[in-house]
Image: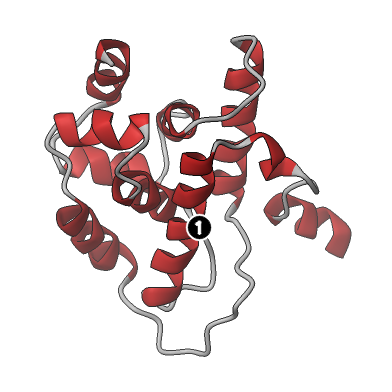
Amino acid sequence: MFERIKSLFELKPNTFDCFTAEALEAVNIAKNEALSMRHNFIGTEHILLGLIAESDGTAAQALTSRGIDLGKARLEVAKIWGESRGKVQQELPFTPSAKRLVETALQRAKSSGLTYVGTEHLLLGLIEPERGVALKILNTLGVTKEDVSKALQDL
């Protein structure tokens, strides 16, 4: 039973081997955002923050072109989760939604015939399921799934 539950949160070894430097940086920033908020997990909302903060990637360009601001997005995450008062782990698990986001990004890149996963694939993985905390935050900030798709196409 533990292994089944554990598999919901853990990614396969070498998952990030084909990530671009920008995509890796976005995931690293996501972890740091979660740690700074004292959250014991990395969720889609943290990945959204990482994608915005990693300013060189396609995802950041698409999000900022639609008026998404890192400070406002952070405030929305804080409104939803607040800040934990408990002890924070250094190794944070991905939520099942964040794990699916990463897996979707890998599939999208592969189906496009690419050998790498960029920030744009992570952003597509974030909006694809049409649910989740990150998409809720984007909607609260006035940006729809269609807006994000259009912004990526424009780039």
Q: Quadrant of the N terminus?
A: bottom right
Say whether residue 54 is visible.
yes
Q: Amino acid at mark 1?
A: Asn
Residue at image x 63%, y 28%?
106
Instruction: Report the front residue among 60 and 122.
Output: 60
Q: From the viewer's perspective, is residue 8 above or below residue 155?
A: below
Report whether 74 appears left or right of 11. Answer: left
Q: From the viewer's perspective, is residue 107 above or below residue 73?
A: above
Report whether 50 appears left or right of 116. Answer: left
Instruction: Report the front residue among 110 and 87.
Output: 110
Quarter where residue 120 is shown: top left
According to the picture, the residue beneath numbered tag 1 turns out to be 28
| Count of marks overlaid on the render | 1
Residue at image x 49%, y 27%?
121
Report whether 133 appears left or right of 103. Answer: left
Give the percent coordinates (x, y) of residue 128.
45, 25
Q: Secondary structure at mark 1?
A: helix
Give the percent coordinates (x, y) of residue 114.
62, 16
Residue at image x 36%, y 45%?
134
